[in-house]
Structure formats: C-alpha cells, structure tokens
Image (cartoon, rainbow, N blue to C red):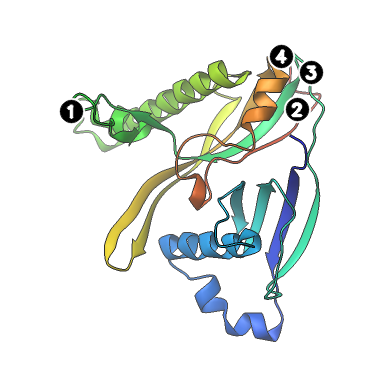
Amino acid sequence: MTGLVLVKAKLRRDLSANALAALLVPAASGARVGAAHRLVWALFADAPERRRDFLWRQTSPGEFLVLAARPPEDPHDLFQIKHKPFAPMLHPGQRLAFSLRANPVVAEAPAEPGKRGKRRDVVTRAIAALPLQPDPEKRRAERFAAMQGAVGEWLARQGDRHGFSPDMRADRLRIDDEDWVQISRDGRRAINFLAIGLEGVLTVDDPAKFLARLPVGFGAARAFGCGLMLIRRAPPDIDP
C-alpha cells in the first residue's frame, strides 16, 4: 500500500481544451471510454516501457478518479488535478459503503486441454440460462433477478478471496447501472464488455488482504475504467 495516491482529474474548460472537446470527450459511449483510456494513460505514461499501475473510473464526462502507485504528470496541461495519499486504516469487522464499476467475469472450461478457458461475463451467462418467457414484464423481472443473483454471487466469491463480505440483502447491494461498451479499433476486432455499476455495504474480514486487492481491482476490463472499488465508512444509520 506504500505510495498509493487517490487522484481527481478534470479536463480543463478553458478555450484551448474546449477546442478539442469533441476528440477528448466523444458523444458515443464506446468512443468516450476509448478516449478516456488514452487520456488517463497520458497522465502516467512517463516512460515507453511503463506498465499500467493504476485503476481509474470516469465519474462524469471528462472527470476521473484514479488510484495509482505514483502521482500523475500532465505534460500537456489538459487537466485540473488534485491528489492525496491513499492509506486507509481498517480493522476486522469494520463496515464500509462501497461503489464499484466492474466487468464481472468467470472463466469457462477450455474446449481443449492446455488451452485457456474463455472469459464470459456472469450476467450474459445467467440470462442465457433463463427459460423462454413470452410475457415482456415477467421477462424483464426474471432478467433483473438473474442479473442481481449472478453479480451478487460473483462479488461474494471476490470477497472470499480478498478479505471482505458483501451484505447480500437486496437493500444493501444495488445494481445502479448496466452499460454495454463497444470500443472500435482500427484494423482490429472491437473490444466489447458489459460494465455493471454496484453500490453496497461490506464488512472487512481481513484488512491486509482487502487493502492489497484494492489497487489491483476486481473483474476484467480494468484498463477501460472498470475494477476500481471506492470505499468510505458506512453511515451510522446502516445497521449490521
């Protein structure tokens, strides 16, 4: 955890930045995520061989939260930046409110021995298993229940491995966003993934394991704005 910083970066709104707005913050969702990916990399790509050592999340168009192993650099003066050390002191049994944008995936069994299993998001997998339902309202209800259950089970497995227990009650674990992202790439296959927004409450079981995982992130598509779990103390009116 030594050296981690939490960064707030906001694109400048002066005339020079506004002239580039259509390029830096495109209107289409997938293009905007792709542009954001490049923008955030620009803050940390201080050397050609540099590997990604940060997680990020777009909180609104042109505004980002980043958890990084080092402070950012802004050689093009595109951002207004604030950053502070990230070193929360946690104890076993502590309850935290959290917000997470994640691409929750599981690895399917490989088709051939020695091959890597294909990763598939848990929501698509759960919905594909539903029986055909001709009634649109019932279909929507069943689809949401399947999504809620699959994402909750995925998060519980993450907690088992990484030192926390999510509160699985319906009023404590909420899906507040569902976004199919497609990022076009010249001459290459487009990147497609499902991003789920989660809000909830968790209990810290093993502070060291939990804190070690936060800068690594949860789920896939972590280079594209997923995986960063934001935490804060749970409000006192939330009962265990």
Tell me whether circle 3 and circle 2 mark residues in contact (CB < 8 Å).
no
Tell me whether circle 4 and circle 2 mark residues in contact (CB < 8 Å).
no
Residue on which the image places disc 2: 234
Q: Residue at x 68, y 73 (%)?
A: 78
Residue on which the image places disc 1: 111
Tell me whether circle 3 and circle 4 mark residues in contact (CB < 8 Å).
no
Q: Nearer the viewer, residue 226 or 72?
A: 72
Q: Residue at x 55, y 62 (%)?
A: 48
Lower position in the chain sequence, tag 3 or tag 2: 3
SS at mark 2 in the image = loop
Q: Residues within 10 Å of mark 2 (few under 14, many from 20)?
A: some
The location of residue 124, given as percent across then percent down, is 31, 35
Q: Is residue 202 above or below residue 205?
A: below
Lower position in the chain sequence, tag 3 or tag 4: 3
- How far is mark 3 from mark 1, CA to CA? 43 Å
Which amino acid lies under the numbered mark 4 shown in the image of this protein? Answer: Pro
Q: Which mark is residue 240?
A: 4
Tell me whether circle 2 and circle 1 mark residues in contact (CB < 8 Å).
no
- How far is mark 4 from mark 2, CA to CA? 10 Å
Which amino acid lies under the numbered mark 1 shown in the image of this protein? Answer: Ala
Rendered-image quadrant of the N terminus: top right
Which amino acid lies under the numbered mark 3 shown in the image of this protein? Answer: His
- How far is mark 3 from mark 2, CA to CA? 13 Å
- Closer to the eye: label 3 or 2: 3
The location of residue 20, given as percent across then percent down, is 57, 81
Residue on which the image places disc 3: 91
Which amino acid lies under the numbered mark 2 shown in the image of this protein? Answer: Ala
Res 141 → quadrant: top left
- How far is mark 1 from mark 4, CA to CA? 44 Å
Q: Is residue 28 above or below residue 122?
A: below
Q: Residue at x 39, y 44 (%)?
A: 194
